[in-house]
Amino acid sequence: MKITKFEIQLQNPQPVYYAGQTIAGQVYLELAAELDFRAITLALHGDANVNWTEHHGSGKNRRTVRYHNHENYLNIKLYLIGDGKEKSKLQAGGHNFPFSITLPMNLPSTFMGAHGRVLYYFKCNIDRPWKRDNNLHLYVTIVSLYDLNNDPNAVKPLSNNGTKTFGCLCCTTGPLNATLSLPKLGYVCGETIFFSANIENLSSKVMTKSSIKLIQTDVYRASTGKQRSVRRTILSHQEASIAPGASFTWGNVGLLIPPLPPSQLIYCNIIDVYYTVELSVDPSGIGFDLNVPINVTIGTIPLRQQYQHINYQNAAGPSGELPDASAPPPPSYGEVVHGKEAIEGAEGEGNTVQGGGMYAPQYPTYEFKG
């Protein structure tokens, strides 16, 4: 093997960037012997894909329909050395090829879901005459700037209530009443959603449990206009039963928001992301749950009134500078709750995915003091 080391090395130790930031680094190539080449190029690609199938009809008329969609966001290509036409040589030893790319502002956040994804990745190519090219892939997370300070509703308190009765028309019980209140609409990852909730069970039924949940709903849009939604519970707290005639008030409980993609997935037209805090009360026996939902917004830049409560420890930039109040604080990082997923089709003959072919998107989180 002439090539003993082939890496894309980023200045940022975590491959996570805000839209509008500059990605700087180098391609490092170590050769055991002289290498013939026409060019070494580095490309940064970004796109979104939606894909799912549905079955329609039955028997001989049963058919499978595939729904899909695609959007392209980035396709930047740099020639690090060579022009792709003339044959050149690289001597044995180590070679560094620096690069710098400034990201556009209007990029949607990296996202991986059940039926779609938004991905950004570097592809480095060594064009070798009369031989198979060498390709290297490195996936990065890009986070769009969702500034809660630009949303006048982000600071507004929210409340919702629900009522449910049980039994038939001629023999109904007293009502089950529930109220859920939040101090505001807008949050960022790493922040705790505090809430107040009250349940009044005036029915003759035992309420077996009550729970408070943070729910993520992903909406996928096919090119035909067909939509598909996937709803999943991110967090859940549960309390014990409520006897007939009794009441229960939730207290001293909050929902700590884990690393998540921001709401709406702005700048992406084929995937939307929504978040809901929902109070749910489960009756014993036959009967549907009483659900009291409130939609919330998860952004990437916190409200200014909270800056003094953010812990900037370990948040300094690469030169040790501290964040300024007008810019989003540099993030700390955690794996997204979806877990690691393989990138299909990235690895193959002549291709390498840096990091073993597995990719776990990461999103900025903030650590709030007291």
Image: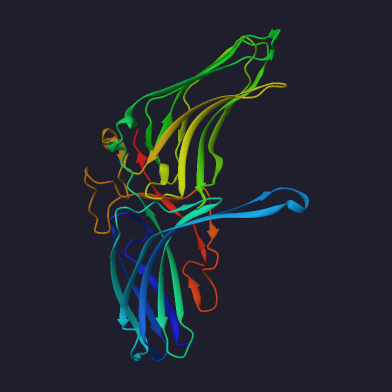
Screen quadrant of the C terminus: top left
Picture residue at 55% right of the left edge, 34% below the top: 236
Position of residue 110 in the picture relative to residue 220 (left or right): left
Residue 95, x across and y down, in percent = 33, 81
Q: Nearer the viewer, residue 330 or 176?
A: 176
Q: Position of residue 369 (x, y in %)?
A: 34, 36
Whether residue 49 appears in this view of the structure is no
Query: Is 245 above or below relative to 61?
Result: above
Give the colouring mode of the picture.
Answer: rainbow
Q: Is residue 206 visible?
A: yes
The residue furthest right is: 59
Res. 156 image quadrant: top left
Quarter of the figure with residue 75: bottom left
Nearest to the observer: residue 6 or residue 347 = 347
Total numbered labels: 0
Residue 297 pos. (x, y %) = 40, 36
Location of residue 313 in the rendering, given as x and y in whole percent from the top left corner: 31, 46
- Tell which of 115 and 21 is nearer to you: 115
Q: Residue at x 46, y 91 (%)?
A: 130
